[in-house]
Image: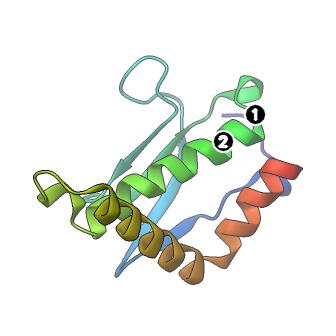
Amino acid sequence: MMQRDRMMQPPKKIKIGYKYFDVRFVERIGMEGQLGAAHWERGEILLLDGGSHVGPTELANTLLHEVIHLVQRFMALNHVREPSEEMITVSLTEGLLMVFADNPKLLLWIQEQMHG
């Protein structure tokens, strides 16, 4: 696993609703080309330790992508057969605002990766 400097380190834990998720770098994730995975039951977010070919913007994109999967699960969107666009938008907006309020370092880290 490559060494990451402090600027590149995402939060080690992220709170989504009532649950905390460990953020871990791994050598391999399920499918070829997959950069991240989120597991509600195991309380973890996995990020591919892709070395130099996974840049900071892509890493921020991947972590936010996995957080959105978990927000969808927390907001129970996966239990609605055909959610309306408005239901999806409201749920994701409220869910992301909750995540950013509970994890202010996450938003700072994403901004740092995007603007480095």
Residue 70 or 48: which is nearer the viewer?
A: 70
Residue at 58 percent across and 75 percent down: it is 100
- Mark 1 in CB contact with mark 2 (< 8 angstroms): yes
- Up the image or down, 55 lies above or below 76; here it is above
Q: Amino acid at mark 1?
A: Gly
Q: How many marks?
A: 2
* Residue drawn at point x = 76 percent, y = 41 percent: 56
- Say what secondary structure mark 1 lies in: loop
Q: 10 Å neighbourhood of mark 1: few (<14), some, or many (≥20)?
A: some
Give residue 6's position: percent from left, percent from top.
83, 57
Rendered-image quadrant of the N terminus: top right
Whether residue 57 is situated above or below residue 89 in the rendered picture: above
Q: Which mark is residue 59?
A: 2
**Residue 97 at x, y = what percent?**
53, 76
Dot 1 corresponds to which residue? 55
Which is nearer the eye, 88 or 17?
Answer: 88
Tell me which residue sits at (77%, 26%) in the image.
52
Describe the element under mark 2 as helix, strand or loop: helix
Q: Is residue 44 above or below residue 34?
A: below
* 32, 92: nearer the viewer: 92
The amino acid pointed to by label 2 is: Leu
